[in-house]
Amino acid sequence: MGAGCALAILVLLVVGLLQLGANSTAGAPSTLTPAEIRARLAGSPEPLAALHAQADELLGGGLPALRARLAALRGRPIVINKWASWCEPCRAEFGVFQAVSVARGRQVAFLGIDSGDASRGKPESFLRSFPVGYPSYFDPSEQAGIAITESGFTPVTLFINSRGAQYVRQGPYPSVAKLEADITRYALDG
């Protein structure tokens, strides 16, 4: 790779990071408390209510447990966000997922995959700072995250519509509007 090409890639990377930082409010923690989130999602149909009952939990069981949960959700629109507590773009987009999962959580199943954190301490602390209305699966080996999203990167979001069709989006969500548009397009058959 030539020096000019390397410099161009570096400039694009810096500009992208600056733009992500300029939209820092997108990842700001929600002002909603876990109790308020539960209240807004109360009365959700099963099996969505089962997800809300496990809000902010870091579930074990790896890939088999995640696949069993997906089988239980078959026929429903699903959004899976693969994240890690050390991943800055993941942290930047988490506020977007907070807002949209509360707004759409009565009709769309949300799940997280904490992929690549070596221990539970940091991701559990992170989830206390960014409460959401759904659980995440603890995936220190990244096996589940790669198997489900077909990507070794974070963040990655997988959309599954009611017919089982899938769409994978790599990279962070910069805004509620962008995530809402993708849910409509890829999960709700919009």
Image (tube, rainbow, N blue to C red):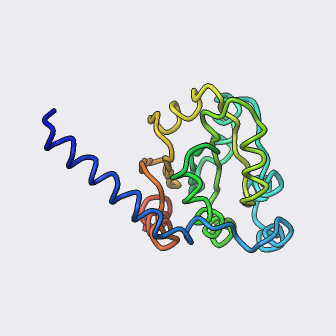
Residue reaching furthest to the right: 35
Quarter of the image with the N terminus is top left
Check the image and report above or below for 67 versus 188. above
Residue 97 at x, y percent in the picture: 60, 62
- What residue appears at the point 44 percent right and 47 percent down from the top-left corner? 166
Looking at the image, which residue is at 43% across and 51% down? 171
Residue shown at the point (75%, 60%) measured from the top left: 131
Q: Position of residue 41 (x, y in %)?
A: 77, 69
The x, y position of residue 98, in whole percent, is: 66, 64
Depth check: 7 or 72 in front? 7
What residue is drawn where x is 65% and y is 50%?
111
Where residue 38 appears, as percent x and y from the top left, is: 82, 67
Vertical order, 118 against 181 (above or below): above
Rendered position, 175 above or below 126: below
Q: Nearer the viewer, residue 110 or 123?
A: 123
In what quadrant of the picture does the C terminus appear?
bottom left
Between 77 and 95, the residue placed more toward the observer is: 95
Give the mark count: 0
Left-right relation of 59 to 171: right
